[in-house]
Image (spheres, rainbow, N blue to C red):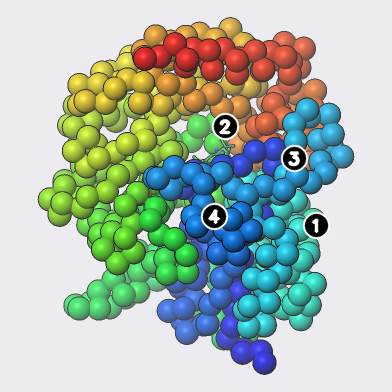
């Protein structure tokens, strides 16, 4: 039997050379689930990336997934053939997430839906989306399949042509989603009154206040011991290599009290003990945002650990912020430095200087963080960037006693840097989003060859090994 109001939400597989669960949660889909339920839809959930799936654990002969106690860990991987364009990359390629037969069992366990909503992550993960949609369509040929998320937003035309979805929704276009729901089920969803999704708007007052603000449907997750929190959406900066403004729209910070209420709810009702902030600019306007948020966490004695895998801006770390981070129990602290070259810093968005960075590190040190525990993002492979600049950055971070997190630049269409990347690289970047993958070292030429990238990676590892 098909219930008209049944909607199935799917978090798809990842196809990549590497994928790690760094507190990865399909937050867009969880927020959608919350809103759909509030509007009376029956929501079902299949998460290809659920490391806690009981069938998967049984297959692995484990009672809980391998990984760190704070919630991070490796995804289950099955090797699959590389797409033709990646054949020259000397690394193994895999499907990360549930084995296909378990995915099929999961699909068989939910009522037949009229509508399937699939989310998407990185643009270069589109083959995982394709495979998820293909299999889902074989099981539910009558269902309409809708794709949203990062890939769908950054490359809607590619997604329309290649994902296999019936419709592609860009960004948080609730009006478009409502139309699709109406066509499939006869019933839409009202647009958020503030025009934003996720919405912070409360349409009711008094006891029910906040009942209408969007909340993620946490109960759909099998394990909530660690969770992602967004205290803001988007970013006030416009770095030339970043597409945050394209995917998250205008920067908006949530009410700090509501964020803490959400953390407290997760802590009490869902036994969440590890919280990863996925904000693009957690510390921006800290006096009215981060500081009151932390003071409230400390006042309410919420005993948990906090993590900033997506990096924070060193510019906004002063003695007070560092002390609050320590008292609230931040454990994973990642700082966004990217480069020490003043020219590159200025050109790419002016988010930090070397002296601001060094000051932030000494404030964190002063608050009791061992320098080695402070992780610092350095970026290699920006168009025009020389290996010398990267080496200098790596040596500087090492000299500060911090752990280097070397990442490779991922070119994103629509950003300022994209055209430069296309011009600089010998790879045909415009032909296939698979080439956005940082693992392929997308901006490659005679100066920045595969060998140079590998040498920089080795240097970072060697420098890290000198830290005590
Ligand atoms: C958190 C984060 C990370 C985390 C986790 C990443 C992950 N694997 O998902 C960490 C720190 C690990 C990370 C790493 C990287 N990241 Co990152 N990351 C983000 C960030 C800040 C937030 C993502 C998020 O949680 N969004 C919140 C949810 C709510 O939003 P959403 O999924 O977009 O969903 C919204 C809509 O799309 C809609 N929606 C979602 N699903 C659906 C489904 C349907 C049917 C519908 C209708 C609607 C819908 O609803 C939501 C409400 O608005 C984004 C930037 C951003 N502001 O989005 C970059 C971003 C996704 N990352 C990016 C990049 C470049 C990277 C790295 C490659 C950086 C590097 N050079 O190493 C690595 C890749 C690591 C890896 N292999 O996983 C790029 C995208 C690149 C790309 N080619 O696609 C982004 C856009 C930032 C940027 N630099 O421009 N990242």
Q: Can you identify the residue that label 4 sits on?
A: 62
Q: How far apart in space, not on screen, are marks 3 and 2 (Cα)?
A: 26 Å
Q: In the rendering, which numbered label is found on residue 93?
A: 3
Look at the numbered disc 4 and give the secondary structure of its residue: loop
Label 4, ligand 1: CB separation under 8 Å: no
The image quarter containing residue 450 is top right
Q: Which residue is mark 2?
A: 241
Q: Is residue 194 above or below residue 435?
A: below
Residue depicted at 78% across the width and 27% down the height:
90
Q: Nearer the viewer, residue 178 or 208?
A: 208
59 left or right, relative to 163: left
Q: Residues within 10 Å of mark 3 (few under 14, many from 20)?
A: many
- The mark that comes first in sequence, 4 or 2, is 4
- Residue 129 visible in image: yes
Give residue 175's position: percent from left, percent from top.
55, 71
Q: Nearer the viewer, residue 256 or 461?
A: 461
* Mark 2: secondary structure: loop
């Amino acid at each position: 039997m098909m219930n008209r109001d049944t909607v199935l939400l799917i978090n798809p597989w990842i196809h990549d050379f590497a994928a790690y669960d760094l507190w990865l949660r399909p937050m867009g889909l969880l927020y959608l689930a919350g809103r759909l339920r509030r509007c009376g839809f029956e929501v079902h959930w299949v998460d290809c990336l659920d490391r806690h799936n009981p069938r998967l654990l049984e297959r692995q002969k484990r009672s809980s997934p391998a990984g760190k106690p704070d919630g991070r860990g490796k995804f289950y991987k099955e090797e699959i053939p590389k797409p033709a364009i990646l054949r020259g990359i000397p690394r193994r390629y895999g499907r990360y997430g549930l084995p296909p037969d378990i995915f099929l069992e999961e699909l068989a366990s939910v009522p037949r839906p009229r509508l399937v909503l699939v989310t998407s992550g990185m643009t270069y993960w589109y083959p995982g989306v394709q495979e998820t949609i293909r299999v889902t369509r074989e099981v539910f040929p009558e269902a309409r399949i809708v794709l949203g998320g990062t890939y769908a937003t950054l490359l809607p035309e590619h997604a329309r042509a290649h994902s296999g979805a019936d419709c592609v929704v860009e960004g948080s276009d609730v009006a478009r989603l409502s139309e699709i729901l109406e066509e499939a089920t006869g019933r839409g969803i009202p647009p958020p009154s503030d025009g934003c999704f996720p919405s912070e708007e409360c349409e009711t007052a008094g006891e029910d206040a906040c009942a209408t603000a969007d909340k993620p449907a946490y109960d759909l997750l099998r394990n909530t011991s660690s969770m992602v929190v967004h205290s803001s959406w988007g970013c006030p900066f416009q770095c030339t290599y970043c597409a945050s403004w394209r995917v998250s729209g205008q920067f908006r910070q949530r009410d700090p009290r509501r964020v803490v209420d959400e953390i407290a709810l997760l802590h009490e009702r869902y036994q969440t003990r590890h919280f990863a902030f996925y904000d693009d600019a957690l510390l921006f306007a800290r006096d009215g945002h981060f500081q009151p948020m932390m003071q409230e966490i400390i006042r309410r004695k919420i005993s948990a650990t906090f993590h900033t895998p997506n990096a924070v801006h060193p510019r906004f770390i002063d003695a007070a912020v560092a002390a609050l981070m320590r008292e609230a129990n931040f454990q994973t602290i990642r700082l966004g430095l990217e480069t020490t070259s003043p020219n590159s810093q200025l050109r790419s968005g002016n988010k930090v200087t070397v002296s601001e960075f060094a000051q932030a590190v000494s404030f964190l040190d002063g608050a009791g963080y061992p320098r080695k525990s402070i992780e610092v993002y350095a970026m290699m492979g920006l168009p025009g960037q020389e290996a010398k600049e990267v080496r200098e950055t790596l040596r500087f971070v090492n000299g500060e006693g911090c752990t280097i997190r070397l990442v490779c630049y991922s070119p994103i269409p629509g950003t300022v840097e994209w055209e430069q990347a296309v011009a600089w690289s010998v790879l045909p970047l415009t032909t296939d989003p698979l080439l956005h993958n940082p693992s392929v070292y997308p901006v490659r030429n005679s100066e920045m060859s595969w060998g140079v990238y590998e040498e920089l990676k080795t240097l970072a590892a060697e420098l890290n090994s000198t830290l005590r």
